[in-house]
Amino acid sequence: MQEYIEFARNNALIVIGFFAVLGFIIKTEISNATRKYKQVGVNEAVMLMNKDDALVLDVREDKEVQGGKIKGARHITLGQLPSKLAELEKSKQSPVLVYCRSGNRSGYASQILTKAGFADVSNLTGGMLAWESANLPIVKS
């Protein structure tokens, strides 16, 4: 036990870094376990979109959408989403697929939607980058 204490004293930055990384891993795992929305890949997203009542929601900024979007997607920026939830009310019990450029902002949007009572929310892992990498179609606005 004494050698561990001595190692910690002599290598404080390594020990602090280890515990910081460990804390980050634990936080991430707890977040993943308690998340109320699903992470889906492009294949699952296509299957979800084939359902007639699925809402596809693009939360990218206006200038990003100019380069193209998924056909049939509704565009509401992440910043506008909390104030526009009432417009999406009819889709609360329907499947909702949310995407952005890389999947990060749409993760926040998915949290907003689940907290607002949307029952079946999915976040497109990798966002438009993954969609385009899979050579799936986009439409220009």
Image: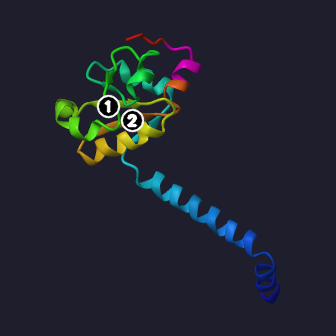
In primary-sequence order, the first of circles 2 and 1 is 1
Image disc number at residue 96? 1
Choose top left, top right, bottom left or bottom right for residue 23.
Answer: bottom right
Q: Element under label 2?
A: strand
Badge 2 vs badge 1, beta-carbon distance below 8 Å: yes
The percent coordinates of residue 81 (x first, y second) are: 28, 37
* Quadrant in which the N terminus is drawn: bottom right
Query: In this view, which residue lies farthest toward the bottom?
Result: 2
Q: What is the C-alpha distance between the residues marked 2 and 1?
A: 6 Å
Determine whether, in the image, residue 91 is placed left or right of residue 72.
Answer: left
Q: Element under label 1?
A: strand
Name the kind of residue labelled 2 in the image.
Ser
Residue drawn at (69%, 66%) of the image: 17
Residue drawn at (44%, 30%) of the image: 100
Residue 4 magenta: no
Magenta range = 130-136
Choose top left, top right, bottom left or bottom right for residue 129.
Answer: top right
The percent coordinates of residue 82 (x first, y second) are: 26, 41
Write down the residue under mark 2. Answer: 122
Determine whether, in the image, residue 22 is placed left or right of residue 43.
Answer: right
The percent coordinates of residue 36 (x first, y second) are: 36, 47
Name the kind of residue labelled 1 in the image.
Val
Q: From the viewer's perspective, is residue 100 above or below residue 33?
A: above
